[in-house]
Image (cartoon, rainbow, N blue to C red):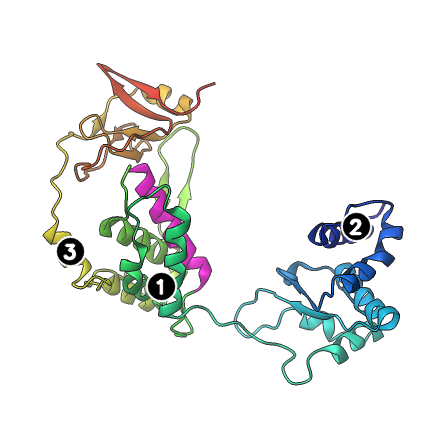
Amino acid sequence: MDNSVQRKIYSTKQFFTALGIPLRGRWSDRKPRLMGHLHQYGTECLVVDDAHDLSLKHLMLLKELTDQGRLQYDHPLGLCLVAAARGNTIPLKETLDQPDPTWLQWRRRLDKIQPFCRVASHTSEEVREILAALETVYRELFPQINLRQWSSSIYTWLTQPVLDPANSGRVTMNYLMKLVTTTLEWTYQAGEPDVRAETLEQAASLLVLRRDTLRIIDGAGPSVEVPPSESTEQGNGSGTEPEREAVQALHVPHTTETGGTVGEQTQTVKTPKCTFPGVVSIDLKRFLDSGIALVECPDCARTRSLSPRNGVLRFPSHDKRKTRTPVTSQRWAMQKTIWEVVGGERT
């Protein structure tokens, strides 16, 4: 069976599954019945996500399906292809512009007034709504989560010229989710019930300023970070103009929804530093062989993912952990006088 037929079968299976219809018979038998089921259910429009990944065979299947609906059932079936694109590029346009009669027919069936539409990225208010939805999703892991208080800061960070070169003033879902999920991962590793200003700002700094940092991994030795190449820098400055603007923006106070600035809130609730000296005396070979990078501070139980630097494991300076929420993930912890791997499912 050739690959084109396999791709068609996969698409048809998705249709049947969405309609809750059992898959019986061969592909050649199921295909003619598909439009009949869509007509029976009163389907008005098919919305295909990630349409930029559709092959010519996929597009042909959709054309045959809509043709059958019109000719056999007098059922006009709408079709919306949702695709990703950069800049002013119109997805699938090269395919639809081909002189073959098939693609000429496709062009004629596009909307008369607005054949191609663009869905804009998110405004500051939409960013706040997305953060509210994410609070609901992650509430079980973070009982005190309040992402909306940082919505103004997040919007400001993610509309820096580095991430928004067109100066659209809009935030893409890609960057928003990278920032939020990275921050939540670090917060979870630290065993904290809510996001701290420092954690969020550190994640934003990495996202904006170190997007093109190349990390070299060489066997069991310490990893090395290589700065961006000279082509990304201007003269002897510290990066491009947008990057320098981003540096300034990341270090100015950002207002929160609860009033005041991130800097002011951080100062009013000052957490004492943990007194743990920093060097983690785990045998390096033992540490690397374990495959576990998470280490628990023996003084306050805060956790961090560590990697050797110059043959030494060092726990970074950190604020003393306030809460004693149980940490169940697999990690290195001090057991009486020796470091051992604890927690998680051991095999």
Q: Amino acid at mark 2?
A: Ile
Q: Amino acid at mark 1?
A: Arg
Q: Residue at x 36, y 30 (%)?
A: 293
Q: Residue at x 42, y 49 (%)?
A: 137
Give SS at disc 2: helix
Label 2 crowd bin: few (<14), some (14–19), many (20+), radius 10 Å: some
Q: Cα distance, mark 2 to mark 1?
A: 41 Å
Report which residue position mark 3 lands on.
265
Q: Residue at x 28, y 33 (%)?
A: 303
Q: Cα distance, mark 1 to mark 3?
A: 20 Å
Give SS at disc 1: helix
Looking at the image, residue 143 lies above or below residue 48: above
Disc 1 vs disc 3: which is toward the camera? 1
Foreground: 82 or 283?
Answer: 82
Magenta-drawn segment: 172-190
- Asked which quadrant contains residue 249, the reply is bottom left
Q: Amino acid at mark 3?
A: Gln
Label 3 crowd bin: few (<14), some (14–19), many (20+), radius 10 Å: some
Is residue 240 shown to the viewer in this render? no
Looking at the image, residue 179 lies above or below residue 314: below
Q: Cα distance, mark 3 to mark 2?
A: 57 Å
Report which residue position mark 2 lands on.
9
Report which residue position mark 1 lands on.
128
Give SS at disc 3: helix
Pick whichever of labels 3 and 2 is earlier in the sequence: 2
Residue at the far bottom: name it: 113
Horizontal relation, residue 76 to residue 29: left or right? left
Is residue 35 shown to the viewer in this render? yes
